[in-house]
Amino acid sequence: ERVGLGSPSAAGAAAAPSAAALSAAMGAMAAKHVNQMAFCPPNPTYRKEDVNMWLDTDRGNRIPAFHIRRGFPLTVLVSHANAEDLGLVLQYWAYMSQQLQVDVFAYEYSGYGHATGSPCEANLYSDARAALKILVDGFGLKPERDIVVFGKSLGSCPTCYLAGKHAFRGVVVCSGLASGARVLFPETRVWALDAQFFNNLGSLASCKSPTQLVHGDCDETIPFSNAQDLYAVCRAHHPLPPGWITGGSHNDIESRHRDAFLAILKEFLAHILAAGPTRVMPPSGISAVLKSVGSSVSSSAKALWSCTAPPRSQPAHDM
């Protein structure tokens, strides 16, 4: 059959690309809408000239980081909330480092503070991979022995992402979301929707590391049902009772409920220290986490690490 421009077959052929283009446009609009809701970068609370550690991501962005090194056996890799930047994180975790007796490494998100790029889910995971890479390749840490990943609110997404890829000494998710869909529609539990954006459920279901959830039961931003859904998928690897904070909202766990929050974290850290390193099950390995990063490390980055990484016996506070 020859198809003329005015025939029904021609009209159908012409409609197909339009439908595909419409679908792509709708997907792009949805992603833009989700990013606008998820990412709220504040004006920088620190000066660019005060940053002496920069990480290059595998998506071409450059992000600041800081490392509080006091020689403690565990290092907490911190992924911050969506309305914070490194300046705010540094102030709080300098205090928490002493309270919990841990070293701390935190990184900026693309498009936040003085980082290049724009905030989006793909860049968020790329930023987390860069942070893990420097701890492993630059500072010689072993994730299953030395690193506890911690994520608050939006920071639960890169934390769960890494935890689903590799064994860590511990995983802490504070006020985390189950998925983008379950924040918007808490009663809609459809895996196909969960998979669209920020699928922490899928990531945490693959996690085999000891996990501790913390969530306020009056959270007005990320409904408490999200925490319950996360607990359902990680219960087998959740050695202690979940840290449900009675009366806790989204932004007052670290302040109004500070004592309860600290008690939960201290009990979990004591547990994983007593239990020993997390067992790495084949084919897990750091290469699985960093597959897309590549093995080459620039000489400038190595020089940077050497000037910001004194021996572990010497206390240091890098930003």
Image (cartoon, rainbow, N blue to C red):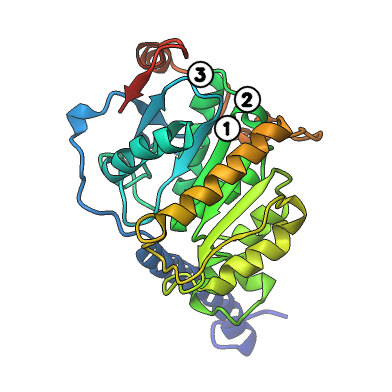
- Residue beneath disc 2: 142
Quick one: label 1 or label 3, which is nearer the N terminus?
A: 3
Residue labelled with disc 1: 147
| Of 117 and 244, the residue lying toward us | 244
Q: Is residue 108 left or right of residue 236?
A: left
Vertical placement of 134 versus 160: above or below?
A: above
Image coordinates of residue 270 in percent, x first then y, are 61, 38
Q: Nearer the viewer, residue 182 or 253?
A: 253
Q: Secondary structure at mark 2?
A: loop
- Identify whether 74 is placed above or below 167: above
Asked if labels 3 and 1 touch by Cβ distance under 8 angstroms, the answer is no
Distance CA(mark 3)–CA(mark 2): 9 Å
Q: Quadrant of the N terminus?
A: bottom right
Distance between mark 1 and mark 2 Cα atoms: 7 Å
Label 3, on which residue? 139
Q: How many other residues sit within 10 Å of disc 1, few (<14), some (14-19) or many (≥20)? A: many
Label 1's element? Answer: strand
Which mark is nearer the camera, 1 or 3?
1
